[in-house]
Image (spheres, rainbow, N blue to C red):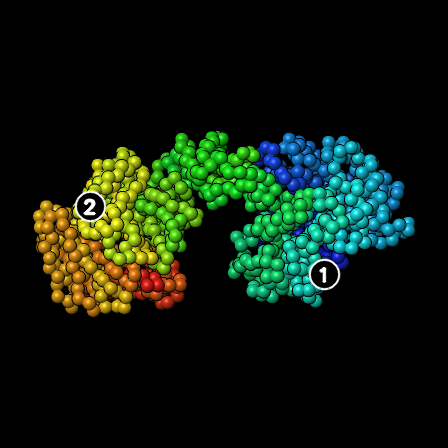
Amino acid sequence: MNRLTTALVVLVVLAAVALLAPIAADSLKPSSHTSLVNTAQGAAPAPAVMANAPLQREVFGFVNDNNLGSSSVGYRTWNFSLLSTVAYFALHVNSGDGALVRDNSWNIYHSPTMASFVSAAHAAGTRVIVSVNLHGDTYVCQGLTDVNAGHTIGEIVGESTGSGLDGININYEASNIVCPNGLTTRDQLTAFTKNLRAAMPAGAYLAIDSFSGSAEDNTGFFDVTGLAPYVDAFFVMAYDMDWANYNEAPLNCTSYCFSPVSPLNTYRFNVTKSMSQYTARVPSSKVILGQPYYGSRGCVGNLTDAHQALVSNYVHTTYLYASTIRSQSGVSNFSSHRDPQEGVGEWDTWYDSDWSCNREQYFDDSVSLSYKYDAVNRFDLRGVGIFTLDYGGGAPELWNALVTHFTTIPGLVGDLAACAGSASASVSWTGAPTAGGPITSYQVTASPGGATLTVPGNATFATFTGLTAGTAYTFTVQGINSTGPGVGRTTDFVIPVAATVATSYLNWYDKASPGVLGDNVHILNSGATASTGCVMVSGKAVAPWTASAGQEMYVTMPAGTIGGPVVVTVTSGPAVLASQRVQFNQSFNEVWAASAAQAATTSYFNWFDKATRGMLNDNIHVLNPGGTAADVTVELSGAVSQLLSVAPGAEAYATFPAGSIGGPVKVTSSQPVLAAQRVQYNQTFNEVWALNPAQASATSYFNWYDKASPGMSNDNIHLLNPGTTSSNVTVSLAGAAPRSVSVGPGAETYVSFPQGTIGGPVTVTATQPVLASQRVQYYSSFNEVPALIAAKAATSSYINWYDKASAGMVNDNIHLLNPGNASATVTVSLPGAAAQVVAVGPGAEVYVTFPSGTIGGPVTISSDQPVLASQRVQYYQTFNEIPSG
């Protein structure tokens, strides 16, 4: 992190000795009222501006002069409709004569930038005031003499009215002392405020910035009760309390140690106590709770403890910089926490190679700010104040916190994502919060072009067509309720393509049903260049992805997402292998995505069961990847056939009544479809793709058979004959007597080996091609896997993920079967683990595993002869098998 060129540069506090001195209750001076340096490159995008937002309380923000016109954090990035007042910070007083200083701030105040800012604010109904500043006991004494104060009042009123502003903010900071003229700074400040009010036009706005501890005993510089008749608002600077709290209980540090900049409670000085004190002395309608859009950080001793003593390099940091530190260069071992004392403020630690030290920071994120905003409403205050708006820029989470606490319009939508398609883009989100009645619609706006789509309030998905391939687009989503349009949230850029590279499918996605703890779509790019694409749950949600060469990664959808089909598209780069890994209660299942080329007009499942104890659901899902509607019949002997009409690109499912059992299940369709069977057995789940006649084989294999290991209750080899001639089938396993059966045309049967049998491979040979699958009952779980055929053997194949580290992952074995006539030397590799090398003889089967604690992907299987590989996973007391892809 180059602190001089990064987006949010921090102010290094040079006067370390002064800053480390104890601070009295009445001098909780916001160091923020000395501006942080901010070059502000690469800040968060601005929220969409809306007209006439119904603010229920005042939202009062300061802006630093140097950042006013910044394209990344200046006024163009703000939502003026969520601001009642903005104070320009600041015009400075020359204490020697009371005149305003002609410095850079003066020049900016008189610049076209200021004029444009005022015009934009007024157009949105936001008042603009100017802050007049004078700090320090000696300077305040000089500046508040009658002559000098009169000079200041004359100039600042003239500047305010002459520039078309709406009022003035007083930012005088000092201790209560007796000045050389025999008067106290306290009494002179009150007189100055009274006289300034008298000199201002009727209806002009007057605010004063006061210390957070000033109302505790009301004996300090700010005479809170004496000032109240003359000001519209006290901007209570409820921050930098860490400097007053470090040597108080509960910390009792002997030198500065880190703690919340603006604690909600617990500490000697805190927001709750301050607001209680203020509202006991003046009407709550005059109190604004000032909050910091900045934090503190420095070098500390370790990466584990809160409230560590400062070692060196103390800095203040803007919100935008503090909230993005984990992604900055030079940062490692980052961890984030909530303060252990008051439970609200965020504190983070990391190692920083730029500073060559451990770092700790405290700042208020949108979560901790929300707790303070709750206090604003609880105390029924005039409103909230922000120091400063340019430290947060357009950060959507900050604006959303204001919306959800102080307006009745909808807040930001959640989980916003956009994906590019063929001259199109799809956008998804989760519902926006609203305090002003239900959301009636969402408006989605494309940029460039400005095209809009409006969808009902219960919709969370929109697709734009007719976009220009190669053009980068963003999309802004706003909720609308009876109060009006809400704050908009904008997606990252997406670039539509002329045509997608590849498409594959999964039947169903579910993060809504009870017991579904995880549903992840894994992507493996086995190519030599990066791939990009999208996972879409049709009409529900999208998730863009990028996978570098050789990378395995996964995407997931927001909680509550349910539906299908799931479409995995590649928009650039090599095609990918996709699989779906589902955690249902304490069971695990994985299935590969299928391509449209695998669709068929006739396909089969070996068995259907809604009769056996524990078989709670057995659904046949049908997906139509084509462009024409498909009329589908799902048949099961002894049951009434189920008829489905499946629209192009759509998914539907059928089931048979409780008590149905048997096989085969036959799926016939007027158009090629992809069918899958999803079974819930007790508290476990399994999915398997249908098999079509073209996949039938006279010789096929299973890697392993087990009726010996604890928990292996059943292991059945199911055989289905899709042909018109009877097939004589032999199922053989080394060390066991072969099982021979005759399977009639269109019929299904199964065989099993005696209890205690274990080994592999299982070989299925038949006089006519058959479809074989293995159905295993392990404890109270169920798994089915199709047979493997020699034509699918490969010298390179992959498994998406390996896990012997996560809780419940008891075993994860890679099984290897050599269907050929020559011995195979096989290498099984996993990033970060030592490769496993084994020899597999002709017709033989072996398995390899990695040490306990290993996790990652992909698993790559490389062999000098084609082999069939599969992964067998034991998760808690459940079992899953998937062939390599």
In percent of the image, x 81 and y 39: which residue is there?
196
In percent of the image, x 74 and y 37: which residue is there?
205
- Check the image and report above or below for 131 versus 267: above
Within 10 Å of the Cα at label 1, are there few (<14), some (14-19), or many (20+) other Cα atoms? few
Locate residue 482: give its quadrant.
top right
Residue 489: x percent and y percent?
A: 52, 40
- Check the image and report above or below for 226 versus 351: above
Residue tagged by mark 1?
A: 20
Residue 91: x percent and y percent?
A: 75, 41
Residue tagged by mark 2?
A: 639
> Closer to us: mark 1 or mark 2?
2
Residue 884 visible: no
Q: Amino acid at mark 1?
A: Leu
Within 10 Å of the Cα at label 2, are there few (<14), some (14-19), or many (20+) other Cα atoms? few
Residue nearest the observer in this picture, 480 or 38:
480
Q: Circle 1 — which element?
A: loop
Q: Which mark is residue 390?
A: none
Distance, label 1 to label 2, CA atoms, is 83 Å
Q: From the viewer's perspective, is 593 left or right of 84? A: left
